[in-house]
């Protein structure tokens, strides 16, 4: 299995290089093509790009192209399978597969949001003792870890 990490802030069009398959056979009996197998949602997000290398053996290189903006708060993992096939024209083609798992890494792209749309009303009796908590408010932040940590705010009189 191949595990890749990619930041949720990478621009559309970013290329993620993948390791290529090896096949000790020669020429057309070696690797001649790659294919991506993925759910529709994954296939809309990542596309397999196969390029012929400039070297003497014209080996193929493969990379995944980010086709649409990533959002860790919506989807933080994508899994897919990449097939490599050799090109035996007599129909005895062999193929191999590898699973690719992409983890989307958080960036701090959400601001804390107060519950209740950030508007609170409290009625306080005039004789309330000092240091009585009259209101607790809570804010939430969809980001991960420190990016999503919200300092608690408590109003007291
Ligand atoms: Ca996001
Ligand atoms: Ca945040
Ligand atoms: Ca985030």
Image (cartoon, rainbow, N blue to C red):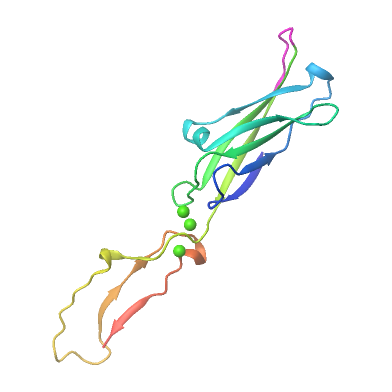
The picture places residue 16, in percent across and down from the top left corner, at: 65, 42
Task: Say if 39 sits above or below 132 in the image.
Answer: above
Along the line of sight, the residue nearer the viewer: 34 or 12: 12
| Residue 119 falls inside the magenta stretch | no
The picture places residue 76, in percent across and down from the top left corner, at: 51, 48
Task: Say if 50 sits above or below 124 in the image.
Answer: above
Could you say which quadrant of the image residue 142 lies in?
Answer: bottom left
Quadrant of the image containing the C terminus: bottom left
The picture places residue 68, in percent across and down from the top left corner, at: 50, 41
Asked if residue 17 lies left or right of residue 116, the reply is right
Q: How many marks?
A: 0
Highlighted magenta segment, given as a residue range: 89-95
Dominant SS type (magenta): loop
Quadrant of the image containing the N terminus: top right
Give the residue furthest to the top. 90
Residue pictured at 63% horizontal, 45% vertical: 4
Asked if residue 69 lies left or right of residue 87, the reply is left
The picture places residue 112, in percent across and down from the top left corner, at: 39, 66
Residue pictured at 21% horizontal, 92% vertical: 129
Asked if residue 81 lies left or right of residue 140, the reply is right
Could you say which quadrant of the image residue 33 lies in?
Answer: top right
| Residue 92 falls inside the magenta stretch | yes
Along the line of sight, the residue nearer the viewer: 67 or 132: 67
Residue pictured at 49% horizontal, 34% vertical: 44
């Amino acid at each position: 299995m191949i595990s890749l990490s990619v930041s949720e802030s990478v621009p559309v069009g970013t290329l993620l290089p993948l390791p290529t398959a090896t096949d000790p056979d020669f020429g057309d009996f070696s690797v001649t093509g790659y294919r991506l197998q993925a759910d529709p949602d994954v296939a809309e997000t990542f596309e397999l790009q196969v390029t012929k290398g400039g070297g003497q053996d014209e080996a193929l290189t493969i990379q995944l192209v980010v086709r649409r903006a990533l959002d860790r708060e919506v989807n933080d993992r994508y899994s897919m399978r990449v097939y490599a096939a050799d090109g035996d024209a007599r129909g005895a083609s062999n193929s191999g597969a590898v699973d690719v798992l992409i983890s989307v890494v958080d960036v701090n792209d959400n601001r804390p949001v107060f519950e209740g749309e950030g508007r609170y009303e409290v009625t306080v009796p005039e004789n309330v003792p000092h240091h009585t908590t009259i209101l607790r408010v809570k804010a939430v932040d969809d980001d991960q870890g420190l990016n999503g940590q919200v300092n608690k705010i408590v109003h007291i009189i």
